[in-house]
Image: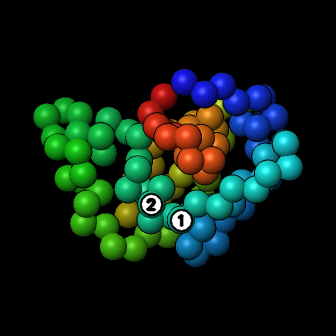
Amino acid sequence: MTQLSLKATTPDQIDFDDNHLKITWKDGVTSTFELLDLRKRCPCVVCKGGHGGKVGTTTGGIQSIKLYSINKVGRYAINPVWSDNHQTGIYSFDGLRMLADGLGGDLTL
């Protein structure tokens, strides 16, 4: 697994608009994520097919999404509140940075 520096996975600023989440990291790099892609990658157990479901069952039909707000989870993640009233996904900063850098980026903690 690729090891990223603490600066590379520590956000300096987090912003979002109608279509994108933008994170500027402490190392100066800015990563931009499409909201629909992030919602479909939700790492929560329900979206990942836990509790007897199938992967993609809850997210497969989503055609558009808005982000209402973002809650920080300690120093390691964010918890988005989506327009479909879903808010149980915890997206790790490590996973988000790796996703942005094309290094895999499994968002599951």
Whether label 2 touches label 1, CB < 8 Å: yes
> Which residue type carries mark 1?
Glu
Q: Is residue 63 left or right of residue 52?
A: right
**Place of residue 69 in the rendered image (x, y in percent of width and height, measured from the top left):** 60, 58
**Place of residue 55 in the rendered image (x, y in percent of width and height, measured from the top left):** 23, 45
Q: Answer with the quarter of the image where residue 54 lies.
A: top left
- The answer, for residue 58, to whether it is visible in the render is yes
Q: Is residue 27 left or right of residue 61?
A: right
Q: How is the image coloured?
A: rainbow
- The answer, for residue 88, to whether it is visible in the render is no
Mark 2 secondary-structure assignment: helix
The residue under the point 30% across, 45% down is 47
**Place of residue 42 in the rendered image (x, y in percent of width and height, measured from the top left):** 41, 47
Q: Answer with the quarter of the image where residue 20 lies.
A: bottom right
Q: Which residue is mark 2?
A: 37
Q: Which residue is mark 1?
A: 34
Circle 2 residues within 10 Å: few <14, some 14–19, many ≥20: some
Q: How many marks?
A: 2
Q: CA distance from mark 2 to mark 1?
A: 5 Å
> Which residue type carries mark 2?
Asp
Foreground residue, 102 or 44? 102
